[in-house]
């Protein structure tokens, strides 16, 4: 039971970090709540899922269609590819186009 509670808290923390990196724009966002109840306490965590890229997040160019990973070029600026900025921190994200497209819209 204690491990389950810790796992849920870890998941909530990771989701919070991901959402913080995507900005706090709530235009078009949906909100869900997860509630964990134990004999000692009740914890409610609100998680917002943004459906639009935050202001300033560059789009993914159409000529990148079919590319599944981004950091092969973007981590080192290969061929002039822009590197991820320090703020918001991108280090917690996996190198997966599906993850990147959560904030960066497809053009």
Image (cartoon, grey):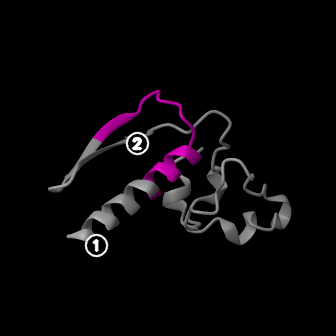
Q: Which residue is situated farthest in the right direction here?
A: 80
Residue 26: % across, % down: 47, 29
Left or right of 25, for residue 89: right
SS for dot 2: strand
Residue 53: % across, % down: 55, 39
Q: Is residue 88 above or below residue 66?
A: above
Q: Is residue 98 above or below residue 103?
A: below
**Residue under circle 2?**
49
**Residue under circle 1?**
3
- Give the quarter of the figure containing the N terminus: bottom left
Q: Is residue 48 inside the magenta stretch?
A: no
Residue 81: % across, % down: 79, 59
Disc 2 crowd rating (10 Å Cα; few below 14, some 14-19, many 20+) is some
Identify the residue at image location x=36%, y=59%. 9
Q: Which residue is situated farthest in the front direction here?
A: 40
Left or right of 22, for residue 57: right
Which range is magenta?
14-32
Q: Is residue 19 inside the magenta stretch?
A: yes
Q: Which residue is situated farthest in the left direction here?
A: 39
Q: Is residue 97 visible?
A: yes
């Amino acid at each position: 039971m204690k491990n389950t509670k810790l796992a849920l808290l870890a998941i909530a923390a990771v989701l919070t970090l991901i959402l913080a990196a995507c900005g706090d724009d709530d235009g078009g966002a949906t909100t869900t709540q997860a509630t964990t109840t134990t004999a000692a306490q009740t914890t409610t965590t609100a998680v917002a899922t943004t459906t639009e890229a935050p202001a300033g997040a560059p789009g993914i160019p159409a000529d990148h269609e079919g590319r599944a990973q981004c950091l092969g070029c973007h981590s080192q600026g290969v061929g002039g590819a822009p590197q991820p900025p320090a703020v918001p921190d991108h280090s917690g994200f996996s190198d997966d186009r599906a993850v990147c497209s959560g904030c960066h819209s497809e053009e």
